[in-house]
Amino acid sequence: GAGVSQSPSNKVTEKGKDVELRCDPISGHTALYWYRQSLGQGLEFLIYFQGNSAPDKSGLPSDRFSAERTGGSVSTLTIQRTQQEDSAVYLCASSLAWGLSYGYTFGSGTRLTVV
Amino acid sequence: RKEVEQDPGPFNVPEGATVAFNCTYSNSASQSFFWYRQDCRKEPKLLMSVYSSGNEDGRFTAQLNRASQYISLLIRDSKLSDSATYLCVVNVFSNSGYALNFGKGTSLLVTP
């Protein structure tokens, strides 16, 4: 697609429920990244994919968080048993390749509110 | 110590003013550098890369001092539309691979 597409744009969920966030990167971009941004805070790196592989999952905040990417394209970030501290904007970005000099293009994010 | 540090501001400047933002980074192995712009409740967007020799894009000038681990962004002839948060971004290779580390941003408000 022309840009990075994320869905849903907004999600309100009850504490304890599972949520699934979707990211559709720019066509041909092999690297995909998930960040989250809490109110008034900077971007917190969560995980990245090179193709379908996520070499390091240590950025995920807890074992309630998981992510996968299939077909080198769409990625889903799943949060199980959501907690109020999970409330944030979850941003997905993609870049042409994984490496030094490639800036990222971000999607418009999913605003998650856990009540 | 945070990996990328910026003065959060806010910087309130009148239209037409020149304003400069600074950023320091802690990892001497950092290899590429960027400035991003983030409007309120929007996603960050790449403003410009920062090269060792310094680079300019219209009213925007970015400079890098590797010895001091310091990056700057200069905006000349500020416009109302420049009001946003400016994020300093550093790309570093670690055990996790390459990742962009974002500063928390410097808030700019340009007033009439």
Image: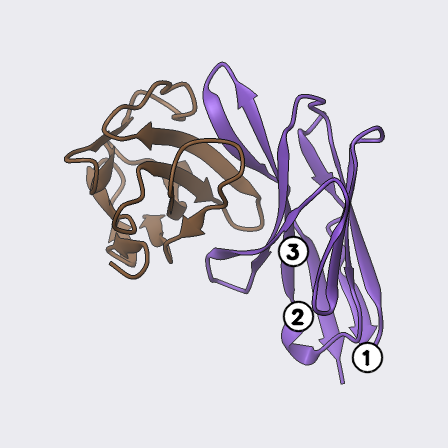
Chain colours: A brown, B purple
Residue in the image at 66% along x and 71% along y = B82
Instruction: Give the amino acid type for the residue marked by disc 1 in the picture.
Output: Gly
Residue wearing tag 1: B16
Disc 2 and disc 1 in contact, CB within 8 angstroms: no
Residue wearing tag 2: B83
**Which quadrant is home to the N terminus of chain B?**
top right
Residue in the image at 46% along x and 19% along y = B96
Mark 2 / mark 1, whichever is N-terminal = 1
Image-quadrant location for residue B103: top right
Instruction: Give the amino acid type for the residue marked by disc 2 in the picture.
Output: Ser
Distance between mark 2 and mark 1 Cα atoms:
12 Å
- Same chain, marks 3 and 2? yes
Side of A115 relative to B11 (left or right):
left
In the picture, the disc for residue A75 is none
The spot of residue A4 in percent (x, y) is: 32, 54
Mark 3 / mark 1, whichever is N-terminal = 1
